[in-house]
Image: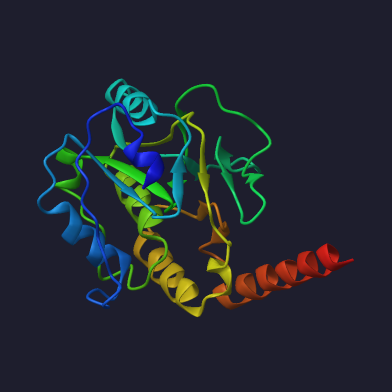
Amino acid sequence: MKSLEAQRGKYELIIVDNSMGNWNSAASALNWGARDAKGDFLMFVHQDFEFESSDWLSNCERLCGGTVGLGAAGVAGKGEGKEIVSNIKDRWPIPKRVSQTDIKAVTKVQTLDECLIIVPREVFDRFHFDEVTCVSWHLYAVDMSLTLLENGLGVFVLPLPGYHRSNNQSLRSGSYYETIKRVLRKHKGSFAVVHTTCGTWSLRRPLIIQRAKILLLMGLMRYQDRE
């Protein structure tokens, strides 16, 4: 909130407060939040994200407005390359770069990370977050990205810095795997592989095997950190 209040550009703030458990999924909560928004661009952003400059929103609006074929934009995403496409930092309490490679221009990806996703109003009027597929707090931006690609629109990462104060625990959640199963089933006719910032998922291999491999690698990484 402090970094948002420091912005020189104009913005409309709609706070979606789920402390009372009014919504059972991010998709339903964010669709509710977008109903009365007045802007040309809708930004759905986690509460633990920090804008690193006072002209961040102005630069974001300029980049989005100048991107032809924009379906959605974000600050972190994944394509076919090995690295995540991003200029932001994450982790807490010690910030760490998400990618070792800076991007200098708006960059195409397959999917966006949920920490921040921007959708033009006219696009969102056609494609809401899928409350049937995304029944948890995960992967709503991934599903939206794939849907937009299927409909001929582009998905991009903006060359903007930021800090996502995340503990990266999504892959330890059972609800994550239930949702990725639904996402893969929904888009199996369009994609053989889905690249996300939390891993690459094949539609041709059993999900249980892919999950076991990722959890094993995460366990090995934690062991190495302790060493």
Image position, residue 58 (x, y; %): 32, 25
Q: Which colour scheme is used?
A: rainbow
Q: Is residue 153 above or below residue 187?
A: above
Q: In which quarter of the image is the C terminus?
A: bottom right
Quarter of the rendering containing residue 152: top left
Of 3 and 136, nearer the camera is: 3
Q: Residue at x 47, y 39 (%)?
A: 109
| Percent x, y of residue 178 | 44, 76
Q: Locate residue 217 relative to residue 97 in the image: left or right.
A: right
Q: Is residue 85 above or below residue 134?
A: above
Front residue (pair 161, 149): 161
Q: Position of residue 29 (x, y in %)?
A: 24, 65
Taking the spot 39% from the left edge, 64% from the top edge, the residue there is 183
In this picture, residue 206 sits left or right of residue 40? right
Q: Quadrant of residue 182?
A: bottom left
Residue farthest to the right, as pictured: 227
Residue at x 24% of width, y 56% of height:
15
Q: How many marks?
A: 0
Residue 147 or 129: which is nearer the viewer?
Answer: 129
Question: Which x, y percent locates residue 64?
Answer: 31, 28
Q: Which of 99 and 186 is in front in this view?
A: 99
